[in-house]
Amino acid sequence: MVVTTASDGTTPRDGWSSRSAFVLAAVGAAVGLGNLVRFPAEAANNGGGAFVLFYVACIVLIGLPVLLSETLIGRHGQASAVESMKRLAAESNASKWWGGIAGLGVAAAFMILAFYCVIGGWVLYYIGLFAADIVQSGISGGALTGMSAEDIKAIFPDLLNNGFTMSVLDVAFVVITVMFVARGVSGGIEKASVWLMPAFFMLLLGITIYGAFTGAFSEAVGYLFTFDASKLTGPVMLAAVGQAFFSLSLGVAGMMTYGSYVGRDVNLAKTSATIAFADTSVALIAGLCIFPIVLAAGLSSDGGLGLMFDTLPHAFQSMPFGTLIGLAFFVMVGFAALTSSISLMEVPTAWAIDKFGLRRAPTAISIAVAAAVLGILSAYSFNALSGFHPLGFIPLFEGEGIFSALDSVTAKLFMPIGALLVSIFVGWIAERRLIDNENGLSGGLHRFWLFLVRWLCPLALTGILIVGIFPSLLPA
Ligand code: PHE
């Protein structure tokens, strides 16, 4: 176990064994289904190059400053997110209620964990599908041989109709996640990141190179990067900012929690920049990995989850070595989803350990059980419980089942509110000297960061929050 010392100099804590372990774990948290499913689909549907450029600007000008703010709060506090916020607030003579911001984040992380593991379960299903296909028909031909286009189209809707199968797979994904979280930071979470992230990168590059040679690569580049400024409308910009925050895992106290395991010798500004750069690169490469395959098969993206679970399996059918590539692809997605679900589970686990003085393994297992129960309810919201709309009384969430309500509430309310309050806290409330000691910046860059955290981030996040709640305010 690697031990770091708390800022009060007393409690020894488990922590990352090196700077690169932190970077890999944080990149693992950031890189997930958001990069692989949502980014490519949104980029393609929302005007390609203009969306991509605006997205990168959001990452640099809004996401990165908040990422640095979150990690520095955690590193300063050397405790769970809520405790770290409270410590920094107390040392800055501010109300301890600021700890509540991180409390919102803990709740959001738990809610995202619940529905994220349902999607993780779908990924397991497709891994099984392609593995069985290899056993049956070998690797040389295309995937899913003998299935008609209709059969393939039916795979995903059939799965969504089957609440029991989805529940079993959800529980399986939660169990895999908790196996790492229960083993601790250096003994479990770090091990997962250090093995899975390099494997993820190799698979991503391998499949992208395969797509570049066998698929419609130049068409995909055109599809993703053609610049058409007229497509950059209000809703598209909103989608880009929301995606930037989700992708960097901000506003849910995750980066605060991971930051709390970082040693004093690490420059947080440099590591935050590395994390944001890696996350954005993966999103862009994911687009260049998926679209050559999809376009070569003459398919088009319908956006959303259908791109991964419907369109891609279809595309693999007609590709050389399609079964093998399909299996590699879903294993890669599984690795990315797992390192993200681990970070999501770690947030409430670290909180409960701190709050109630509990031991890690039983705490993580209790949270896993609760997440599995909520996940099973989410799985049934596609079928037996589809008529149940838990937040139906709020117009914004009208008609949404449990799964999509969890997604919307966290994306539209919890994440932007969390990130907004973090930027206000770091920009205006926290003692300047304490912040300056942590952030690893100096000179003009320091002043620029401060300007972004004090002005641009709060303004942009308030805007996102308002138009997220009142979408009709946006000009189309
Ligand atoms: N960033 C992850 C993704 O892109 C999702 C996530 C959000 C993970 C919040 C942790 C916390 O899929």
Image (spheres, helix red, strand yellow):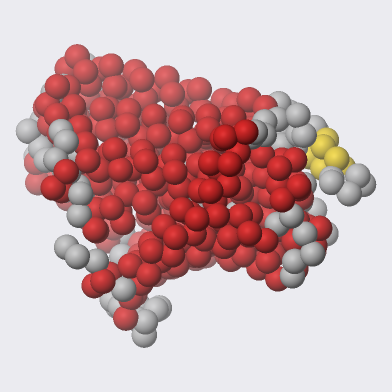
- 351 lies above or below 1: below
Of 384 and 462, which appears nearest the observer?
462
What percent of the width, then of the height, locates residue 161? 27, 61
Left or right side of 311 for 343 = right
What percent of the width, then of the height, locates residue 206? 34, 18
What percent of the width, then of the height, locates residue 304? 25, 50
Count of labels in the image: 0
Q: Specify the quadrant that holds the C terminus.
A: bottom left
User: Measuring 67% from the left and 27% from the top, which residue is drawn there?
Assistant: 19
Of 265 and 201, which appears nearest the observer?
265
User: Measuring 49% from the left and 59% from the top, which residue is drawn there?
Assistant: 458
Residue at far right of view = 10
What percent of the width, then of the height, locates residue 326? 28, 29
**Which quadrant would residue 380 be assigned to in this image?**
bottom left
Left or right side of 163 for 42 = left
> Is residue 184 visible in this depiction of the protein?
no
Of 277 and 5, which appears nearest the observer?
277
User: Measuring 44% from the left and 60% from the top, which residue is drawn there?
Assistant: 459
> Is residue 466 visible in this depiction of the protein?
yes
Left or right side of 48 for 65 = right
User: Measuring 36% from the left and 38% from the top, which residue is drawn there?
Assistant: 56
- 238 lies above or below 147: below
**Which quadrant would residue 13 be assigned to in this image?**
top right
Of 81 and 307, which appears nearest the observer?
81
- 314 lies above or below 383: above
Left or right side of 333 for 140 = left
- 178 lies above or below 274: below
Q: Specify the quadrant that holds the N terminus.
A: top right
